[in-house]
Image (tube, coloured by chain):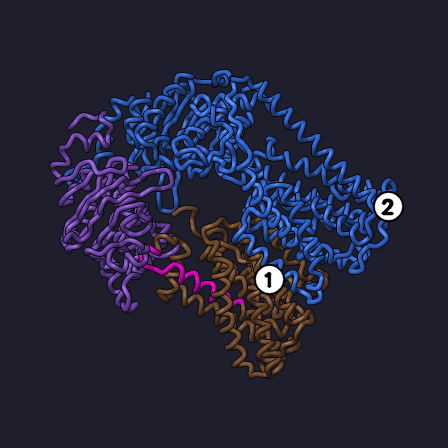
Chain colours: A blue, B purple, C brown
Amino acid sequence: MTSMVDIHRAHAQSHKRGLIAYIILIGLLVYVATTKQFDAYITNILMQAVTYSVAVMGLTVVLGLCGQINLAQAAFFGLGAYAVGLGTVDYGISFWGCIVIGIGIVLFFGAFLGTSTLRLGGHYLAMVTISFQQILTLVMINWIPVTHGPDGVSKILKPSLFPTPQSYLGFCVVVLAVVGYLVWHLPETKLGRAMRAVRDNELAAGVTGIDVQRTKVIAFAICALLGGLGGCLFAGGFAYVSPDQFSFAESIVFLTMVLLGGVSSPVGAVIGTGLLILIPEWLRFLKSIPGLYLAIYGLAVILIVLFMPDGIWGFVSQKLKRFRKVLHLSADVPELELVQTQAHADDVLVVTSLSKHFGGLKAVDEISFTVKRGSVHALIGPNGSGKTTTLNVLSGLYTPTGGSVSLDGHDITHAAPHMRTAVGLGRTFQNIRLFRSMTALENVIIGGERSGNPVESGALAREERARAALNFVGLGDRAEELVTSFSYGHQRLIEIARALAGNPTVLLLDEPAAGLNSTEKMELRDLLKRIAAKGLTILIIDHDMTLVGAVAEHITVLNFGRRIADGDPVSVLNHPDVVTAYLGSDANAAH
Amino acid sequence: MPLIELKDLSVRYGEIEALRGISLSVEAGEVVTLLGANGAGKSTTLRAISGLTKPASGDILFEGRSLAGLGPEQIVRLGIAHVPEGRRVFPGLTSRENIMLGASNRSGVSKSDIAREADAMFDLFSDIRPFADALGWTLSGGQQQMVAVARGLMAKPKLLLLDEPSLGLAPVIVSKVFDIIKEIRRMGTTVLLVEQNARMGLSVADRGYVLETGKLVVSGNPSELWNNEDVRAAYLGGHARAS
Amino acid sequence: MDLVYQLLFTGIGIGSVYALVALGFVLIFRATNVVNFAQGEFSMVAAFLMVIFAVDLEWPYWLSLILSLGGMAIYGALFNLGVYYPLRHRTYLPVIISTIGASILVTNSTLALYGPQPQVLSNLLDFQGINLGTVFFDSQYLLIIGVTIVLVAFQYWFFEHTLLGKKLQATSQDKEMASLLGIPVAAMIMITFVYSAMIGGLAGILVAPILFVSIHMGGTIALKAFAATIIGGFGDVAGAIIGGLALGVIETFGAAYVSVPYKDGFAFLVLVMFLVFRPQGIFGERVAEKA
């Protein structure tokens, strides 16, 4: 057993070695780029590849990490390029000043498009970005007094610091290296994890405390920023920009580059960009027939999506994975603590006259119940009685038709899912919703990253807490494995650990026993008892009466959307209405 | 020869074993009820019969012929109609249109004949006649259930699979739905009924089977099952007194 | 005042084309939950087929029209088999990207085969139009409006009064349930693509004499049709028609009173304004979130 600090030190050291190797590699590249004599043609191709790669990494972030589409990357690229072109030529602003202005402009448009569209879902975003692309092309061509129209802007100056093309190329390589480094490490940051969570499972991301909308907008803005930065560098390198360089077709080229190389990594971005800049140069004869080579791009897009969804780098890294060994570090972490916020009142979750109707169907009809602090409360009822709907209203996935919900004195009736999590609501799902591309540890860390978590934060503390939560459910030694490699029952435990890491005030468990075999059910029962022993308030929904009877101190029974009984287990389970609800009544005799 | 026979049927959903080798049969003209708690595998059994879920092993014989490899569209043409859990009434179509589409498995029937048959369904289900032209999503749960059963009968099935017709319905509506099942039985249609509501489920049945976590545990006639302690335990977890 | 009537007429004419393409959009979206980004190419391909048959081969218009629409039916079927069907179990993102790939492929293949110069197709009717006062009713616009009315009426009858129409609706609402009733789901989706390609193609043929027949006509029309569906309320058939007409009128008046070069920009401006202020469109969501 090693301590967390040791593990962290080991990680930091391997990280440091990697960084040094990376810096040496980039140094070599810069040395070659600046000293070796290239002819102008080669320099231009390299310049294009490097500046395009910066923009394509933007797509790595938005599409690869966050799962959102952007079909206007050429427009952002063009905005950056025009900022440098017009700024230096017409307004006499320095190159560096233009970069700042250009980035400001793309961030503004990126954030505007993002905030107005991202909540509406993928199709809207695709269309709106295409529209933005088209409008921008129209403006570039038609607003002649400002943009010079179809002729474009020529005689753009390089910054005086890098007077020769090759020294400027060296500078661009450094910028690309820095961007690549940041994008490579982004997935391991809190923001990057949030993006991946949104991509893997938007619903679960919200319930785990991630502000889904904000995360998407940030991803989109970063993508726009990198597009704009690439464009700024491009304008300096080529000294000439015109509208046709930034058309919709170019946005498709950017998209093809990231898809071909692989959306999941900046390495894929560089591979895809390099190939798609070199291949057309090798196949220049194709350009003699207009349209032919873009037609091949179109076909390539379809074929990649059909047969190589992870791109070249995805394919290669899959092969490499066999040689990489997974570290099995069992860290010596302290036992999981569940810190409770200062109690305001004994009634921690108060549900009053809650209703949810779907058209003519009253799924939940004026239900009221109160969960006491520190108790295990069960909500039961036959299938279709409205339990899961109630839970979905409680966690903010449905808006109630009427009634109110308050948690720890806060009215959360209309709060978004992540706001409820911030107040202290944690939950699991009947059909497990883990972030499937991540390890068990990453899943649980995200749970601990919720805002309002009363436990101290900081990367070390968060990881320690996540490991403690995994130890608590008995999976600590498999923390580094992907969640998809766990059995169904163990995935359920990871989901519980994810909720526990966030220190919830109330834990909602949605049919935790569903799909488990009898041994797993016994383990689950013991786990729930251990959680309850730590004083955490639990609201459990299940059909499994053995489980409910063994752990619950208080039971509320629903049937056809209404509350039919409420009280301690023995009296509730023998309540005539409950027996009737489960075993059925002879309805004919009753009438 | 039984109308339908399940032989050592197993179904898996990824990691989960939903059915673990069950064998049962239904004779022509019978009403057989499949009981069990939620998650026991009742719905999975029906989904396997109607072709929505592919079995991992075992076989299903309908009129002596194996259903292996057939999809739901082909199986319903052989005469097995499935009224699934949750009713699944098309929300954007009217009750009448929903019911008329129930005849989609029969070829060579004219639209006017189908319309006439659908109208006859409103005699059997008189409660929904006033809502014949209301869109599916505006109906209450009970009305949706009646539309769903009527839609299933429009297939003129040799075997009708009914999945939890009492789901989420108030007792007075449940009793109406079961009156209709009795009527269906009187008309001679063979029914395989899945029910959580044990008393109601057994009240219309000739025989019953009890499933527990993917396995058949007991079978027998309704009164035997009703008085069986194991059946009660499967539902109420042994906490309730026998009444 | 006459100018207003003239513009209104022109706007409704061009808006009818957007409405037809939007209709095709909505049908595919409802059947597959996928926005087809190659929808505009249905119009473009049909217009080029018409140029091949009627202009290059000099066959009669009626025959060219039948052949072009027949060609579109085949194209719609191939499109379904090549671009949508293999991806039907994946999420929407690969499907979107695949349709975008198809759009690029078809546009540029046409460019490679036919070159960049726009083609001209003359009015389908022999007479030029009618003068009523100072307002000129161009025959092509009259034809467009007439065909749109007939098609919308046909579609209403088809979906509301035929069993096949009901089966298509059932498929778009719940595929699993439809298959349980014996409705052949794959065939229903195929019919949707074929029909959608044909009405998109018809719109392209009708608008060809007004615009030039160029490889870019598909992209422009598709974006406007999409804007029309957003204005009307996404996935709503009536909304798509009203949205298309509204957009045609807004655009025509915008071009006349504000700026010609930015004519194509108005659609996008309206689109963005709707997205920001009323994303559910004029009609909003008709069917509740869960039935």
Judge whether A271 appears above or below B112 on screen: above
The magenta region covers C179-200
Q: Residue B217 appears at what percent x and percent y?
A: 20, 36
Q: Chain of mark 1?
A: C
Is A326 displayed left or right of B131 in the figure?
right
Residue at the image position 22 percent from the left and 52 percent from the top: B61
Q: Is residue C225 magenta?
A: no
Give the amino acid at mark 1: Leu
Is A354 displayed left or right of B57 in the figure?
right
Give the amino acid at mark 2: Thr
Q: Residue A79 appears at what percent x and percent y?
A: 74, 49
Is B192 displayed left or right of A51 in the figure?
left
Mark 2, Cα crowd under 10 Å, few <14 / some 14-19 / many 20+, is few
Dot 1 lies on which element?
A: helix
Determine if residue C245 is in view.
Answer: no
Q: Residue C201 appears at what percent x and percent y?
A: 54, 69
Residue under circle 2? A164
Residue C105: mark: 1
Q: Nearer the viewer, mark 2 or mark 1?
A: 2
Dot 2 lies on which element?
A: loop
Foreground residue among A362 and A298: A298
